[in-house]
Image: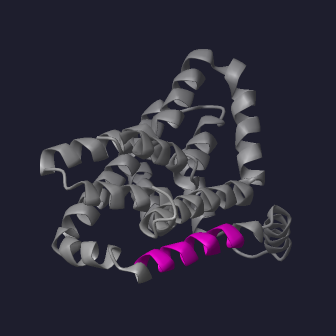
Amino acid sequence: MRILPTLALLALMDSSSFGTFDIPILMLVQRRVRAAAVLAYLGALAAFYWCLGMALVFGARGLVDAGQHLARLRAFAVGELVLGAALILGSLFMSQKRATAKKEARLASGAPPTLMQRWQARLVGERASIGAVAGIAVGVGALEAASMLPFLGAMTMVLNAHWPLGLAAAVLAGYVLLMVTPPIVMLLLRVFLGPRIENRLARVYSWMESHSTVIFAWVLRAVGVFLLWDAGHRLHWWR
């Protein structure tokens, strides 16, 4: 149970991703907010990640013994050290200006909208049904799952904890619930405060959109630092 605070921190890091933050904010800055659609989106996204987490944790149980043997090898710690350093160094070369320039060039060239842009249009359009919103949530989760490094790290921690099925399922449920808590709080503020919070949410969305590369870079650095710390522990640099 000592890993629960770390899992909570990782869940909050996951709450800043495109699917768990940017899209809900986009739905909340519309003139007419459909609370049921927002909740359907967040519920489907949380359910997807819970199912994915259960599949990763219990589907990998058969590999645990081999994984534990590998984790004791010095080569594993060295590889972890190299990966952590690579993530940190790679994040230092991520430029928001280059990402923004690339996006502007795409718009100027008249390129067709991306899959994510088409999905965003369906989320906030008049024809956005609950079923369509839930389906898009699952699609978004499937597309960005591989880049959700905090989530993947959290699943590794749950796997290594060797918890029974019921406890692991409950912890994963708490994880995904915490992951979608920030947008749920913002939904409540939008519903009860109305126009008084609308402009602030719009500014938050604009800031997140213009700093998405920087935010992702900081997530990479955090994961890199964690890997370096764990590698140092395995190499007995500190205890």
Residue in the picture at 46% in, 65% down: 236
Q: From which residue to which does the magenta span run? A: 76-90
Task: Point out the image quarter for the C terminus.
Answer: bottom left
- Is residue 41 something that shows in the picture? no
Q: Residue at x 70, y 56 (%)?
A: 212
86 left or right of 233 in image = right
Residue 210 can be seen, yes or no: yes
Residue 59 lies, with reference to residue 11, above or below; the image says below
Q: Closer to the camera, 86 or 145? A: 86
Compare residues 165 and 35 and report the one nearer the observer. 165
| Residue 125 horizontal side relative to residue 47, left or right | right
Residue found 72% across the figure and 52% down from its top: 209
Where residue 227 appears, x then y in whole percent? 51, 64
160 over 66 or under it: above or below: above
Q: Is residue 138 above or below residue 180?
A: below
Q: Assign the magenta stretch its main secondary structure.
A: helix
Tell me what residue is drawn at x 19 percent, y 63 percent: 58
